[in-house]
Image (cartoon, helix red, strand yellow):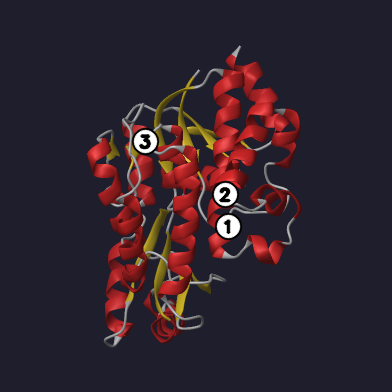
């Protein structure tokens, strides 16, 4: 079966994720055990049993989502014989995509995203940054709004998710001003997000610097299939570009709508959302309805996929 691969980002986590897969498939158990070994603590127990407040800490959430996604990928690869056309991840999910493509060894990937989570959390003191979702505004209108309310502070589009949904990030004061004025600019809704840091904006530069140093010690291998990069929405199969794209991604907006369109342009008509949640299936329906997305995060979904593939 040929399919594109989709990997979710932060926000898709839930206590219990990956547990049924690990109970049903030895290859998934091996992935969770490898994550525990790489990190030196029981990430698997945190994924499966919580507590939820620990799982939602950015430094834990990022390796937890990557591990669950990679476990799901290994299961569908071995059980269903999936042949990827290309892969796409949302923010953190780009690391899952790169691990699936073979560019990053799994142990390296899980350690990198643990560091990435810690670095992003520590880049901005708690309470000083914020994010908000705006619905019903075009990108240019959002950029103009951010420029208008910035008043010398950081305020910019962070996630261009498609379907009229754009997330902005910056200082708390600037995002408060966005929330206060967005509806007068034509937004249908403006919703503050419960996040621990203002991701994908200039405030994340200290995290990008730390990641750049860490990536110098990581071996990046040839990619078995293209991974569409968040920062330029282009399919990349050049191992030499991977590190720079990952560093830039920390402060650059996630251009997910363009990434989804790029996936469709490659000829993908079927995609598998691997791991926790169904967020990307919802986004892709609005971006490129020609790509049919199946979310695969539990044994029942694997069984159904296997039946479809046979």
Front disc: 3 or 2: 3
Q: Position of residue 113 (x, y in %)?
A: 47, 53
Q: Secondary structure at mark 3?
A: loop
Q: Residues within 10 Å of mark 3 (few under 14, many from 20)?
A: many
On the image, numbered disc 1 is attached to which residue?
61
Is 305 or 182 nearer to us in this picture?
A: 305
Q: Secondary structure at mark 2?
A: helix
- Indicate whether 51 appears above or below 309: below
From the image, tell me which residue sits under label 3.
103
In the image, is 228 to the left or to the right of 57? left
Secondary structure found at label 1: helix
Q: Quadrant of the C terminus?
A: top right
How many numbered markers are drawn? 3
Q: CA distance from mark 3 to mark 2?
A: 18 Å
Say whether disc 3 or disc 2 marks the residue closer to the N-terminus.
Answer: 2
Residue 158 seen by the camera:
yes
Residue 66 in the image: above or below residue 79:
below
Labels 1 and 2 touching (C-beta < 8 A): yes
Give the CA distance from mark 1 to mark 2.
6 Å
Q: Residues within 10 Å of mark 1 (few under 14, many from 20)?
A: many
Asked if residue 127 lies left or right of residue 40, the reply is left
Residue under the point 54% across and 24% down: 77
User: What residue is shown with label 2?
Assistant: 65
Disc 2: CA contacts within 10 A as few (<14), some (14-19) or many (>=20): many
Q: How far across and down, in percent of the image, does residue 85 sit?
A: 39, 26
Q: Residue 295 in the image: x percent, y percent?
A: 60, 37
């Amino acid at each position: 079966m040929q399919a594109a691969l989709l990997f979710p980002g932060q926000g898709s986590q839930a206590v219990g994720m990956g547990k049924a897969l690990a109970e049903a498939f030895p290859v998934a158990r091996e992935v969770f055990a490898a994550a525990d070994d790489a990190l030196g603590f029981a990430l698997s127990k945190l994924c499966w049993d919580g507590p939820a407040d620990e799982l939602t800490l950015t430094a834990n959430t990022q390796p937890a989502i990557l591990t669950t996604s990679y476990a799901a990928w290994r299961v569908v690869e071995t059980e269903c014989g999936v042949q990827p056309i290309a892969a796409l991840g949302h923010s953190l999910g780009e690391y899952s995509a790169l691990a699936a493509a073979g560019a990053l060894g799994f142990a390296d990937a899980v350690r990198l995203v643990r560091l990435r989570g810690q670095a992003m959390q520590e880049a901005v003191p708690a309470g000083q940054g914020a994010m908000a979702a705006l619905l019903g505004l075009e990108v240019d209108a959002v950029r103009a709004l951010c420029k208008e309310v910035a008043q010398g502070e950081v305020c910019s589009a962070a996630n261009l998710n498609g379907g009229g949904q754009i997330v902005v990030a910056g200082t708390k004061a600037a995002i408060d001003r966005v929330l206060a004025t967005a509806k007068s600019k034509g937004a249908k809704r403006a919703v503050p997000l419960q996040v621990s840091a203002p991701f994908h904006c200039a405030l994340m530069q200290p995290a990008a610097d730390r990641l750049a140093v860490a990536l110098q010690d990581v071996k990046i291998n040839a990619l078995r299939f293209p991974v569409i990069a968040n920062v330029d929405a282009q399919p990349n199969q050049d191992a030499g570009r991977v590190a720079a794209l990952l560093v830039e991604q920390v402060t650059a907006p996630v251009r997910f709508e363009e990434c989804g369109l790029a996936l469709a342009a490659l000829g993908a008509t079927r995609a598998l959302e691997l791991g926790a949640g169904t967020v990307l299936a919802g986004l892709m329906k609005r971006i490129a309805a020609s790509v049919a997305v199946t979310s695969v995060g539990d044994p029942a979904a694997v069984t159904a996929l296997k039946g479809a593939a046979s």
